[in-house]
Amino acid sequence: MDLPHPEYNYFVARQIYNKPAFDDEHERKARVPKTLREKLVPKCDFSKKRAFQITKGFLPILDWLPQYRIKEWLLSDIISGVSTGLVCTLQGLAFALLVAVPPKYGLYAAFFPILSYFIMGTSKHISVGPFPVTSLMVGSVVLTMAPDQNFMIASNGTSINGTVIDTAARDAYRVMVAGTMTFLIGFFQLGMGVLQIGFLVRYLSDPLVGGFTTAAAFQVFVSQVKLILAVPTLNYNGVLSIIYTIIDIFKNIHLTNFADLVAGLLTILVIMTVKELNTKYQHKIPVPIPIEVIVAIIATAISYGVNLQAKYNAHIVKSIPRGFLPPQPPDVKIFSEIAASSFSSAIVGYAVAVSVGKVYANKFDYTVDGNQELLAFGVCNVLTGAFSGFLATTALSRTAVQVSTGGKTQIAGILSALIVLIVIVALGPLLQPLQTSVLAGIVVANLKGMFMQVLDVPLLWKQNKTDSIIWVFTCIGSIILGLDVGLLAGVVFEMATVVVRTQFPSCSALANVPGTDLYKNIKDYKNISEEPGIKIFKCNSPIYFANIDFFRDRLKAIVGVDAVRVNKKRTKALKQIQRLIKKGRLRATKNGVVSTTGIDNEAFEKDPEEVEDNEIPSTQVDIQVDWNADLPVKVAVPKVHIHSLILDFSAASFLDVMSVKSLKLVIKEFMRISVNVYIAGYDDEIYQKLELCDFFDDMVKRDILFLTVHDAVLFIKLQSINGTIQDPIYDKIALMQNSKDPILLTDDDDEEVETYDNQHRAIHGLSH
Amino acid sequence: MDLPHPEYNYFVARQIYNKPAFDDEHERKARVPKTLREKLVPKCDFSKKRAFQITKGFLPILDWLPQYRIKEWLLSDIISGVSTGLVCTLQGLAFALLVAVPPKYGLYAAFFPILSYFIMGTSKHISVGPFPVTSLMVGSVVLTMAPDQNFMIASNGTSINGTVIDTAARDAYRVMVAGTMTFLIGFFQLGMGVLQIGFLVRYLSDPLVGGFTTAAAFQVFVSQVKLILAVPTLNYNGVLSIIYTIIDIFKNIHLTNFADLVAGLLTILVIMTVKELNTKYQHKIPVPIPIEVIVAIIATAISYGVNLQAKYNAHIVKSIPRGFLPPQPPDVKIFSEIAASSFSSAIVGYAVAVSVGKVYANKFDYTVDGNQELLAFGVCNVLTGAFSGFLATTALSRTAVQVSTGGKTQIAGILSALIVLIVIVALGPLLQPLQTSVLAGIVVANLKGMFMQVLDVPLLWKQNKTDSIIWVFTCIGSIILGLDVGLLAGVVFEMATVVVRTQFPSCSALANVPGTDLYKNIKDYKNISEEPGIKIFKCNSPIYFANIDFFRDRLKAIVGVDAVRVNKKRTKALKQIQRLIKKGRLRATKNGVVSTTGIDNEAFEKDPEEVEDNEIPSTQVDIQVDWNADLPVKVAVPKVHIHSLILDFSAASFLDVMSVKSLKLVIKEFMRISVNVYIAGYDDEIYQKLELCDFFDDMVKRDILFLTVHDAVLFIKLQSINGTIQDPIYDKIALMQNSKDPILLTDDDDEEVETYDNQHRAIHGLSH
């Protein structure tokens, strides 16, 4: 794809365009905003067809089930459903430990959400149910609301540090809290779905999610290590609770139950090894080995056979009663306490489900409807919460099982629910001898992928410092503050980085690339140079309240002219010159103003500040002064070597009221010292904002707007040739001085002294 | 300033530049980043002169006091100092009521900060001391920490609803809380000064400050009305506390003390009237009438003469003991409870002082150093907090008095402190008969300006919707949530608006303005039209995690091509064509692929999804297909009418890792369907970001980057003429079909059905 001809094939010959000239020639279309009626009418189509479409939108099952290809899909859906169902059962039991409720409630969490998702979901492949991170988020709220300490009684029970706990009451209350929170989460998701604000999930950027899930993996790991070691810890919540838990674990590590420890470690070892093999030989074996299920069955058999509980005091699942609990109403009283955490969890749960759903939707070429998913999960969680389950989303590992075993539609999902149902109503008691440390081991063995994300950080740092800082901040924040607050802190931090990125934009002086209409940063190219007398300033960001001061500072620094200061000094000097003329010490001639005698001190006795408040005379009132010549007065007026300033607005994507006001002020300040300001590369929207904020008046006219920087530069050059620019450098009448004595200069404002001033200050200092 | 010549004076003839071509011709300068040594060396200059400069920086008094012009300035400083001192005294007493501490502590708050500001401050004109808004912010914390309810006792005291309160203990605790909070505020300000993060104040944009101060005025008004009516209310804090207070006031309004009410209303009336006159005749009277001082003196005299307290049970200032209290250490225990509010107050206090300081610095042509001010106010507040005063900043009204009576330097400030000192050590008891309702009246009468800000809102709404929403949100938030939390909510909301403004940027399709190198939104101009086959897409914002999905959606909508879907459909069709060729039903000829028989159903039996997972064949493997001709297969392949897509990046001021990844994906998706993608108007920084994130590879090459949109368009046109572009519309071998039966089309993905598809679906439906 080399450029075909090296000749001058970019050829443009046209008029120079400023805003009025361009608008004259090229007629603008007025955009007619749609009326309310026009906007509403398409939404108010109540035909039967439309009604059916809407119903299908809310209940996607009406759409896909009639098209189900039984012959082709049913067999693989059955195989997939059964495999996934076993994993569902096991993960349900395991993740219940993260929620700090008895394992059986995990079965409800694995069963109920699938029912409503089957009807309302738009993903064909995800396996709906609990997920470790969200389970832990619910769990941390459960532990905060119902710590062991609240259930200490005098009767028998589990013993911690000599005190006794009413586990039945505690667990009942914990289940209620988990259910209520899940209900509230569903409510939030429904609300977001109705308001169509699923886009909130976009704030969960990849680096943020990376940091968050790594922190979550760490939190999950700690909570499961506790179960594998089977050591008691107190319940902590809030800042640093994980650190206190770790300290507790080490403090009580002498209480470790070795039967549980061995079972847990073996589980981790076996599962991780087989998973490695599954990955390595994935093309050689038809389906991955369902190692978790195998391990669980073997472990249950061993525990039952050896009677680990009785002999080694091992912690087992204990009670999995058959059947369901009646639905419970949520406890409205605790809503306000758990609202913030529920909202975080609702967002995370939804984000996990949608991101996994989208992966498979892309792979199999269909779309997942974000808002419908919000509604579907909202209903799922309301239902699950009512039936004592906990937060439903999806788990990538389980969904991978469902897909890799051949799942084609949510028929596989509903079949997996059937398996869970069978366990609930019939097989549950068989799993009672299973050790909790084996379940914990299954959870830990699945954390590897989440921990491996740490390795992304160095690459991220190389690619984009800000993104890697977001990653690290969210990770550390979520570990220290807990997952819910940590996530919120991460999002606020991330939003702050966006603001900061626009708050300190890169600003540069541009110069013409010779022979072209292109303008580049003078720091970046060797053979480009600025037109004498013209400065081009580009600020690479929108201009608004947070960066307008920065914009002004950079403008001052890059242009090298402090317009306010220059104007003050000129006014001061002018006053003195006028006074000298009045006294006859200076004379205005055709060739300039000539001082007739040396300068005496009398002229300086009156402090110039005293007259400051009066009307400031324009430089044109009496005399014209060449401000870049040496002046016959003691005021050091900074030299200004430009007559035109072009502001390149091509990257200014929005302005606000404050920035427009400030810009106007800046332009006027420069105009007062005879520097013309032009705005180039403006967007039509920016122009409208300027109009709305009364940017233009007698001084700041619309014809300072130019279509491109080159238009502005050509215009300035043309004006310069035609002599229409009042060039402050070359075109002023010279102010002459015929005394040859050096002029002594002083200045009140020490912090602002220019080099020129400093030299003469030394002289002045000596003369005292 | 009309354009001088109507001819074609914009003339450019040059080579077309893409990135490699431009870099070949115009040598880039490598920017050498400064080494750590180079950065540090200038800061490590330990010469004597430098040491003196640094000392002068921290103690500006060393700079300005030696230059004090006694003859010229001293007299006006004395006059100003005495007037301001009287106002300081009065405002000190009045604002103490806002802090809910006895009035005498306001005198300390008016005295101590001036001492340290005299030494460390950089503003010559501000009158340092309490300010109503910040006083109320301290007050709300004081009331939260020490509500009346906490000090109920059985002995004598003030009576509320029959219970009795230990006012002495309550007031002592309140003074301690106010002092501790002020100390902490000073500590925060010092910290920000040391870290040089005074720029945080920039987040307080004009609309936010407008809303906040209006809310503050309302809060101040309610708290003072309570004092003017002299009705008891309970102390509320947190959300909606102001509403409860208002309800309490109305509930107890029958307890109004008429002596207090009359005094308060008269004060308000007189002060507001005289202030109006002051403004109206400001050019005719030498100095404004010090009406507050006059009213206070008269009111004190009347109260003393008539003995209002004894006769009418009026509430008076009561005890102003002579002298100072010994310094108190702050109560570190309550730091954590008051930290958040203190931080808000520290920011507000600093922001008020600096903004007032800057107004006068601009007027009198000197500079106020933001960081030095932070340090100065930090020290002021630490000192004031230790001596039982409260938050020092400045009040515009008091500063206006200081300036209008002729204050030239902080000598006026220190003299006003002297007046306060005289009151503290000698005259205090004389003010004891003053009614608190008069003090409250003075505060209320000064709120007018703050309330008038409400009138800005309609104009703001016209100029910029976002800014006006920020105003209203902050105002309502600060009223409902309280000033500290409300301010924080306002800042977070404001930051969110910045994110949202970039999250939903305006995106548009551009087209060439005929005869020029300019490209404008096709919706905005009448006589511009798009080049056939070329789409130019501009997204008017940075591209990053929050808007990348939006960017992709808009791109899809505006370009009118869903590249992923097109590719899937083409792949599907190609598979069927290949199968048909294999079976001999289609024949590839030189002129295209000819189907030899009609289409039978056998070809469609196998589900195309099943082969999806295998390697996707490129469109070039076996045959070339003209995708825009009618195909002899039942797959509806959407037609693509463009061969080139140009992304205008001129407004993309930054990218992040997510957006670069997504952009690369988008470009590859388009390339797969033979649409070439070019990026035009890129900034050199954006190029570097792309390089760092491994954007370029064998498929996405550096020569897709063009300097301007016009360069890209010219390049595409040249390629097209030379036939080097594989134009998917015109250059493909036609795929011919010799059967004349209508082709039946079906499609699995209902939600994505195109119009073309729908038409034929109707036919298909009938044929069942």
Image: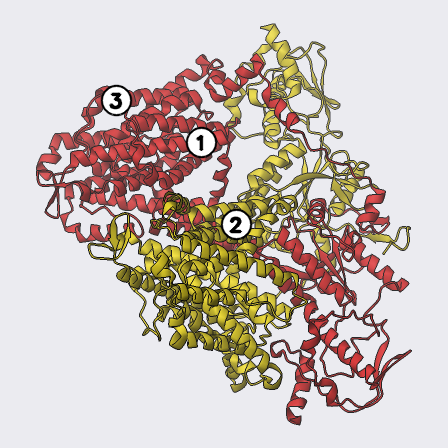
Chain colours: A yellow, B red
Nearest to the observer: residue B553 or residue A564: B553
Tell me which chain the residue with mark 2 is part of: A
Q: Are marks 1 and 2 in contact (CB under 8 Å)?
A: no
Residue drawn at x 82%, y 50% is B17
Query: Residue beneath label 3, please?
Result: B326
Tell me which chain the residue with mark 3 is part of: B
Q: Secondary structure at mark 3?
A: loop
Above or below, comparing residue A20 to residue B605 in the picture:
above
Q: Are marks 1 and 2 on the same chain?
A: no
Above or below, comparing residue B171 to residue A121 in the picture:
above
Image x and y of residue A25, in percent:
74, 58
Image x and y of residue B574, in percent:
77, 76
Q: Quadrant of the C terminus of chain B?
A: bottom right
Tell me which chain the residue with mark 1 is part of: B
Question: Is B95 placed left or right of B263 in the picture?
Answer: right
How many angstroms separate mark 3 from mark 2 (CA)? 47 Å
Query: Residue beneath label 2, please?
Result: A495
Q: Which mark is residue B191?
A: 1
Above or below, comparing residue B539 to residue B333 in the picture:
below
